[in-house]
Amino acid sequence: MKAVIVTESGGPEVLQLQDVPDPQAQHGEVRVKVMATAVNRADLIQRKGNYPAPPGTVANILGLEFAGVVIDVGEGVFGMKPGDRVFGLVPGGSYAEFVVVNHRTLARIPDNLTFVEAAAVPEAFVTAYDAMVSQGNLKSGEWVLIHAVGSGVGTAAVQICRALGARCIGTSRTKDKVDRAMELGLHRGIVMEKGDFAAEVKTIVGAQGVNLVLELIGGNYVAEDLECIADQGRIILVGLLAGAKVDMNLGAILRKRVLLKGTTLRARPLEEKIVAGQLLANNIVPLLESGQLKPIIDKTFPLADAAKAHEYVEKNDSFGKVVLTLE
Ligand SMILES: NC(=O)c1ccc[n+]([C@@H]2O[C@H](COP(=O)([O-])OP(=O)(O)OC[C@H]3O[C@@H](n4cnc5c(N)ncnc54)[C@H](OP(=O)(O)O)[C@@H]3O)[C@@H](O)[C@H]2O)c1
C-alpha cells in the first residue's frame, strides 16, 4: 500500500509517500480502506522526533484518526462486515491506504456525513467530549472556558457545550476565529491581544468565575485559569502549545478546591480505546445525525501532500480541522 512515511525526524519535508507492506487483520481486527484522515498537533510533534509512537504502534507512519470502508474482517469479529462505513481512533498509522483496528474501537459513520467530514470528527469531538463531560463532569447551565477556540478540539467543544446546555467563553489570538466560533454557538469571545484573559472572564460570568476550563494551551494559561476558576472548578489539561512549564499559585488550588487533571487519548490501552469508540458511537454520532454537531473543516489536502498540510497547520491559520484525502 501507499503510506506517508516519516523518513527521519525533522520538518515537513521528511514526510514522503512510499510503498509499504499492507497490514493484515488479526483476531478481533478489521482492515479498513482509509478514505480520509486528518492532521493533529501530535503528528507535528512526533514528526519532529519529540513525541515517539506508543509501544507496539507503527513508528514511522503518522495518523491518529480515519474514516473509511471495512475491507475484510479477522476471526472473532462480530457486527462488522466488508463494505461498512466506519470511523475511529488509532494510536498511529492512518496516513496510509489501509489501517488494521480492533472492531470494538470502531463507530459507524452516520449517513449524513461524507468520508471527508467523518475524518474530521474522532480526535476533535472525542477529545472535547471526554475531557469536558466524561472527566470534567460538565453539567447543563455551567460556564466553560475554552482556549484556542478556533482549533479542531475548540470548535468541537463549543458545539458540545451548546448541545448539552452549557455556556462557553472562548479565547483565541485571532479575532476572525472568535467571530467564527460565535457562529457555532460560542456565548462570548476574548481576543488575546495582551495575552491575559482572567479579568475579562470575570467581567462576563461574575466574580465567582467559570466552572470548567478546557485547557488546550498550557504554559502560563494555567496560572491565569486559577484566577478565574470557580470554587470546586475543574481544569482539564489537554494540550501544551504554550509549553509545559508554569510558575503558578498552588494556594489557589487548595483554597478553591480545584481539580486540575491531565489527559491524553493517544497512549490509552485497548480497553480504554474501546470506551472512546463507544463514546463516539453512542454520544457523538446521534448529535451528528441530528445536526447539533457538525465537523468543521478548514482545508483538505491529498495524502501525498501531507507535508504541505503540516506546513499549513504549523502556521496557526486554520479554523477547525485539516483533512487528508485518499478518495
Ligand atoms: N490530550 C489529547 O488527547 C489531545 C488530543 C487532541 C488534541 N490535543 C491538544 O489540543 C490542542 C488543540 O489541538 P488541535 O489539533 O485542535 O489544534 P489546532 O486545530 O491545530 O489549533 C491550534 C490553535 O492553537 C492556537 N495556538 C497555537 N500555539 C499557541 C500558543 N503558543 N499560544 C496560544 N495559542 C496558540 C492557534 O490558534 P490562535 O489563532 O488562537 O492562536 C492554533 O491555530 C493542542 O494542544 C493539542 O496537542 C490533545
Image: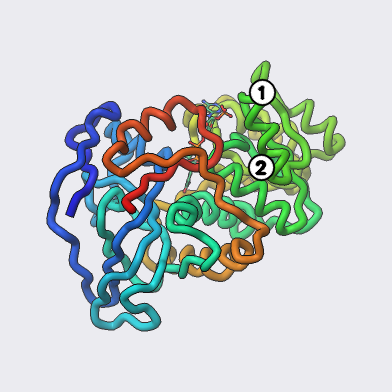
Q: Secondary structure under badge 2?
A: strand
Going by the numbered disc 2, the residue's amino acid type is Val
Mark 1 burial class by Cα count in 10 Å: few <14, some 14-19, many 20+: some
Give the mark count.
Answer: 2
Residue at left offset 65%, top offset 60%: 291
Percent x, y for residue 302?
Answer: 33, 42
Residue at left offset 76%, top offset 52%: 166
Percent x, y for residue 322?
Answer: 45, 41
Percent x, y for residue 198?
Answer: 74, 28
Q: Secondary structure under badge 1?
A: loop
Q: Quadrant of the N terminus?
A: bottom left
Where 237 sits versus 242, above or below? below
Residue on which the image places disc 2: 213
Where 174 sits versus 269, above or below? above
Residue at left offset 66%, top offset 23%: 192
Q: Is residue 256 visible in this depiction of the protein?
A: no
- 113 or 227: nearer the viewer: 113
- 253 or 317: nearer the viewer: 317
As drawn, which residue projects farthest toward the top? 194
- 181 or 123: nearer the viewer: 181
Q: Earlier in the sequence, mark 2 or mark 1?
A: 1
Is label 1 within 8 A of ligand 1 (CB to nearest ligand atom)? yes
Q: Quadrant of residue 151?
A: top right
Residue at left offset 70%, top offset 52%: 161
Residue on which the image places disc 1: 192
